[in-house]
Image (spheres, rainbow, N blue to C red):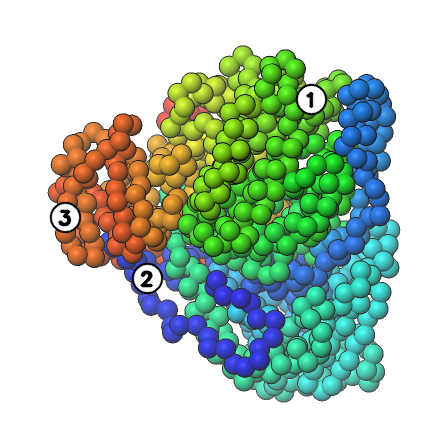
Amino acid sequence: MGRKILAHWHHAPGGSRGHYDAHARYPGVPVAVDLQKRVGQHRLIYNGPAEKWTDGLPLGNGDLAAMTYQPAGALCWGLTKSDVRDLRHPVVPWVKHQTMRQIFQHDGNHLLTDQINEEEWDFRTYFPCFLPAGGLWLSSLDGQDLSVRRQELDLYRASHTMELIGGGRVESFVYADGNVLALRLSGLRGRELQLQPSPEAVDIIGTEHDGELQQSIRREVFRQLKRQWTDKQGSLQIDYADGHRSLLFFQVRGARLETEDQAASMARLVVEDDSAEILLTIVTSREGAFLSRRAGLLLETAWQRGFDRLRYDHENIWHERWLRSSVQLPERVLEALWCYTTYTMASSSRGAYPAPLMSAWNLSLAQPYGGDYHNNINSQMCYWPLLASNQCDLLKPYIRHFWSVMPEMEMETRRVWGIDGIKVPFASIGRGIDHWGVGYWRYELFVSAWLAQVAWWHYEFTGDRDWLRDYGWGLIRGVAEFYVNYLETDPATGKLSLPLSKLCEDTMFNVAPSQRLVRDAGMDLTAVHGHLRDAAQAADALGLTVDANRYRQTLANLNGVPQINGEFALARDVSLDVPISHPYTIVPIYPTGLVTQLGPQELLPVAQRTLKHIWRCSSRVTMGQPDQQRLRWNDDLSMGWIGVARAWMGDGDGALDALLNGWVTSTLKSNGFLSEQSRAPQERPGMMWMQNQLCGLTNGVNEMLLQSHSGVIQIFPAMPGSWDQVRFIQLRARPGVLVSAQWENGATRWVVLNAQHPCTIRLRNPWPEISLEQIVVIDTTSGATTHPESIDADGHLVLNLVADQPLLLARQGQEPGDIAIDIPQEQPNEPWSFTGPIQLRKDDPAPDGTWTSWWGRA
């Protein structure tokens, strides 16, 4: 699925590469996986309808997405498309940095800067950035029931099936290689249905949810609607306020459309055959002109292939996606969510734009924050797990998008900050300008480093020097130049520092007005340390010695990360007890990696003490719903962030507690998403979610299984004591090594290393208690057996890897034998539940209460 999604076909595409094998084989790996069963066991099943879109089941191909749900008496596919968005920007000249600095720092007029912050913060676009692209509604006209008896979302096949109470079956999928939603209606011959294409995916007009804000947005956004009908096709053209246009175009076979008015909002669909089919596409003016022609050609070629062939190729393409990597975890719910992350990101991050904040399946006109890109962790967190999951192609829309708006970011940086470089917007709508939340929030300077870090990590994990040169380096260098130009000498230390930076998010309102902005906020200064380190290494990779030396010289003269009482601090003059909304003080651990379980030794106790006391000062901490003995962070991202930081420090039990007990227990919705905040299960159905929640959880799982920071590959670096049987296949490690391994009864059983290009690696010894002569290294290509030849000063194995020549490592005498077949135990084809929190260690107190959440709906 690394191929480009087709917005239209000039000729019939070649399709995928043959049908999938029953058991997936991997080079050198002594296990074959039955992917159909391994992934298929995580299907989502509802024994009844999903009445609200917030409980719907998602489909998508990375550009075109559909949320399937069933309001009373109807079947609905709520549609979004990555480039259907409003790109207008408020015509507001944000106050320049020098003016803010003069007022705040030199004049000490903090009331005035508070007023500027309030005005700029509140002046956001009231229209959404990410828009619903339309909806397709089917309802009954003949008095027969169209209610759903049972429905299933098959993750492996990326398809949705409904069985109707009145008889009949409805299948749908969004074709993986072209923007076509395919529907098949079976067993409905002779039925008369009402078919309605709508500019909104949610029909709230006239309901209690149709408030003043929604009405204002509707009047503002949809400037003109134009419908056309024939007996075999229909279309809805939508003209938007920002000047772009979309065309929702569909055709039917095995049925006919009847309408008396060409401008009618709906038509009668008369089903004539045992099997009727609908193919739908959406094309936009952002992709080019001639919308009707492009849509017609796309569907014409799809019809030439036919529904069955489209589905066959679609399933093959998804099989190729699932073939990239797999995990086997003791906790079924974590394995299901790991697969669901791959499914949702592959379904929402292959188009013209990256995955939006509220996911590709938020159908509300008034969705929170307009579905923008929150670049102060949310957008980055969506992409953190994908490299280790070996889904590297899914990062490219993210990097490419911000690369494409570099000129606008550079222009805005010069205008607002008066210096060269790139200051990444705190929140953006698909452009290079802050669209709201400026004021003090512009001083969240870590935003830029974290976005550029994703581009650097892409190179570290893939070794793709061309992509680094063409797309990554511009961002990395631009951010580094901004920092170098912004840094000033600290009068107290004589070193370089950030003259004004911000206590992150609403922390600034929990301190005196004079501390709203501070010198060297810990989160920002840590990010600068990490970025200058990474920028120097990126320059080395491209042979840019002058840039590399300059960044290292700046880094060497930079103030150290602030500490108070042996903990990482918000700033050197800000108390550790100031309430904070997220665990900002763990940034030196993750994602910056200034300290991990590998060291440096002098920072290990600081990191450990920081994690131990992380609950002390949370403004969003609650007792642990429902386990009142433990504190939990109650928001959309903190527990995943804490989980991965604990994993980087080698605390597997702590990581599992954060992810499973602290997050899944309190937020799992029946459709697989995680609600924005902790709620009792019965309160979650109407709640929205953010895409970064799934990704943050999967990132934590990946880092428990495999780490490759600090120049060392670590196998099972953070295993919980309760996990006795774990396997992962083809997770990716730096510097472009596919790693597979198995854990049994508290020890690593075997490891397979398959390099994508020649490299020398350091591997943390999985068996430090035995001699090198007792470790066998098998060249799985030739069958030759050797032993590790050398170790470094820290005891890590040093191995020279040849491209596509996997090495298998095991204890001597315990080498794996014949290929084992991974066939998961058959599970009932029904919804299932998870009850938590669970007791992770025997000496832990038993939870004083539990919640039961469902995967699917019973």
| Along the line of sight, the residue nearer the viewer: 580 or 599 | 599
- Total numbered badges shown on the rendered structure: 3
Quadrant of the rendered image containing residue 701:
top left
**Pointer 2 residue:** 24
Where's residue 98, x and y in %? 78, 30
In the picture, which quadrant includes the C terminus?
bottom right
Secondary structure at numbered mark 2? loop
Relative to residue 813, is residue 261 depicted above or below? Answer: below
Residue at image coords 38%, 23%: 843
Label number found at residue 143: none
**Pointer 1 residue:** 518
Q: Is residue 84 visible?
A: yes
In this image, 597 relative to 150: left or right?
left
Q: What residue type is labelled 1?
A: Val
| Along the line of sight, the residue nearer the viewer: 138 or 231 | 231
Measure the C-alpha gap from mark 1 to mark 3: 59 Å
First of labels 3, 2 by sequence position: 2
Task: Give the label, 1 or 2, closer to the camera.
Answer: 1
First of labels 1, 2 by sequence position: 2
Where's residue 234, x and y in %? 72, 79
Determine crowd level at label 2: few under 14, some 14-19, many 20+ residues with C-alpha closer than 10 A: some
Label 1–label 3 contact, CB within 8 A: no
| Along the line of sight, the residue nearer the viewer: 102 or 448 | 102
Task: Give the label, 3 or 2, closer to the camera.
Answer: 3
Residue at image coords 49%, 56%: 393
Label number found at residue 785: 3
Secondary structure at numbered mark 3? strand
Relative to residue 682, is residue 42 depicted above or below? Answer: below
Where's residue 809, x and y in %? 22, 44
Quadrant of the rendered image containing residue 790:
top left
